[in-house]
Amino acid sequence: MNLVLDIGNSLVKYAVFANGRLVHDESFAPELFVPRVKSIFSQFPDIGHSMISSVGNLDPKAREVLSLFSKVIHLSNESKLPFKNSYASPQSLGVDRLALATAAFYHNPRGNTLVIDLGSCITYDLVNDSGEYVGGAISPGLRMRYRAMHEHTAGLPLLEPAEILDFIGNTTQSGMHSGVINGMLQEMDGTIVQYLSRFQDLTVILTGGDAHFFVKRLKNTIFANPKFLLEGLNYLLEYNKS
């Protein structure tokens, strides 16, 4: 069995895999790392290997605890990859994007795959039909856009994301919701069209914590997979075991 952990800016997401199949996943706050790790291995004592992917901050001592229970691989830019990485600055590429590209490579090994991850930021990552990661884009995520309007103006409130009934807002709050939600929809649809103009037979995967706001609203055909990053981490763990 494998354990993969995605350590983000505010949450730790983990998944347990058995023979390539996801059998359990949850998330917790980083400060609960040690007790939750102990609980995971108590529940799944057959875990033999673990992989950590971290874009957030975690106490090194907490990481050491994990090594008491299993062999641990820390995903980094030095890790072995199953695809060709053509990114011009590979040392600056986030490990979360490496995991997403890996999942794309295994999901559609002979096709062009664009992964849109809706997390703190929106990331766009493309793996082509030659098994080559070519890059993508990064833009502000859902909550970041709400915070930016609040923090950089004198009068706009800080709102929680909400569904919109019409793209024309008739109050300040509904206008803000429309600006964020509709703006992101137009951005993603427009970006997909750009990629379609260059890459034929394009498969688009939508993932990330905020994907549910948009999966039914996008005009272009997409596939939603909220566990895509975790699946990519498990592929990388298997690939790097040796």
Image (spheres, helix red, strand yellow):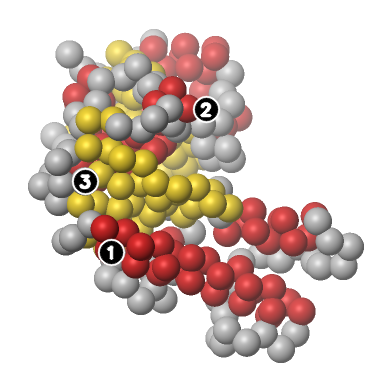
Q: Quadrant of residue 60?
A: top right
Q: Please, which residue is most extreme toward the right here?
A: 154
User: What's the distance in space between the residues labelled 3 and 2, CA to CA?
Assistant: 37 Å
Sequence-first disc among 3 and 1: 3
In the image, residue 28 lies at what x, y percent?
51, 39
Density class for disc 3 (Cα within 10 Å; few <14, some 14-19, many ≥20) is many
Q: Please state if 76 lies on the left or on the right of 47 as rendered.
A: right
- Residue drawn at point x = 20 percent, y = 52 percent: 112
Q: Quadrant of residue 95?
A: top left
In the image, residue 151 lies at what x, y percent?
80, 55
Mark 2 and 1 residues: CB-CB less than 8 Å, in contact? no
Sequence-first disc among 3 and 2: 2
Q: Please state if 211 lies on the left or on the right of 199 as rendered.
A: right
- Residue drawn at point x = 69 percent, y = 73 percent: 176
Identify the residue under disc 2: 33
Numbered tag placed on residue 197 in the rendering: 1
Amino acid of disc 3: Asn
Identify the residue under disc 3: 128
Density class for disc 2 (Cα within 10 Å; few <14, some 14-19, many ≥20) is some
User: What's the distance in space between the residues labelled 3 and 1, CA to CA?
Assistant: 14 Å
**Nearer to us in this view, 30 or 200:** 200
- Residue drawn at point x = 41 percent, y = 36 percent: 96
The secondary element bearing badge 3 is classed as loop
- Residue drawn at point x = 89 percent, y = 62 percent: 154
Q: Is residue 106 above or below residue 47?
A: below
Mark 3 and 2 residues: CB-CB less than 8 Å, in contact? no
Q: Quadrant of residue 11?
A: top right
